[in-house]
């Protein structure tokens, strides 16, 4: 319902950008509803720093990406390269701010054991940010 209404409002004026914003808005609403339900039934909130930190990292990064994408040529190679660069910056920023949880470490270690690979210098990064 949210997506349909937002699309009806935004697409005529903004086109594909309006559709993207409408979809993002509907996903945000869809993500918030379980949080409200958990709060209603348990009286506890699931909102904490680990939920909001990635959002607060993404907003300034997105604002920095807009002029970069407008300045780069609209070719697939440039778009892919700029997207990959900003994705890498985002991942590194999230790791610096939040670090690795015990669950993250368990998954990474199970990958190492299951595929019999050595993470090498990545182990130093894991120890540093956990």
Image (cartoon, rainbow, N blue to C red):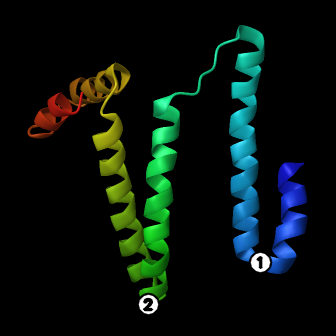
Q: Is residue 53 left or right of residue 37?
A: left
Measure the alpha-carbon separation of dots 1 and 2. Answer: 22 Å
Does residue 27 sit above or below 62 in this rendering?
above
Judge depth for marks 1 and 2 and give the one in front: 1
Circle 2 residues within 10 Å: few <14, some 14–19, many ≥20: few
- On the question of residue 119 being in view, the answer is no
Does residue 6 sit above or below 92 in this rendering?
below
- Mark count: 2
Q: Residue at x 46, y 41 (%)?
A: 53
Does residue 61 sit above or below 49 in this rendering?
below
Q: Is residue 84 left or right of residue 37?
A: left
Q: Is residue 103 left or right of residue 112?
A: right
x and y, in percent, of residue 5 in the image: 90, 58
- On the question of residue 100 being in view, the answer is yes
- Work out whether residue 83 or residue 63 is closer to the camera in this orientation and state it: 63
Question: Which image quarter: residue 102?
Answer: top left
x and y, in percent, of residue 52 in the image: 52, 39
Image quadrant containing the C terminus: top left
Q: Earlier in the sequence, mark 1 or mark 2?
A: 1
Residue holding disc 1: 14
- Work out whether residue 39 or residue 31 is closer to the camera in this orientation and state it: 39
- Work out whether residue 73 or residue 77 is closer to the camera in this orientation and state it: 73
Q: Residue at x 72, y 75 (%)?
A: 16
Q: Is residue 25 left or right of residue 83?
A: right
Circle 1 residues within 10 Å: few <14, some 14–19, many ≥20: few
Residue holding disc 2: 73
């Amino acid at each position: 319902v949210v997506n349909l209404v937002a699309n009806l409002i935004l697409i005529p004026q903004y086109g594909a950008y309006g559709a993207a914003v409408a979809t993002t808005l509907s996903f945000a609403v869809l993500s918030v509803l379980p949080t409200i339900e958990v709060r209603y039934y348990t009286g506890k909130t699931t909102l904490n720093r680990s939920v909001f930190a990635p959002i607060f990292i993404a907003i300034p990064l997105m604002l920095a990406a807009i002029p970069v994408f407008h300045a780069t040529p609209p070719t697939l190679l440039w778009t892919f390269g700029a997207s990959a660069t900003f994705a890498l910056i985002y991942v590194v920023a999230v790791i610096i701010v939040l670090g690795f949880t015990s669950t993250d470490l368990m998954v990474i270690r199970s990958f190492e054991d299951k595929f019999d690979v050595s993470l090498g210098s990545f182990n130093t990064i894991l120890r540093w940010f956990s």
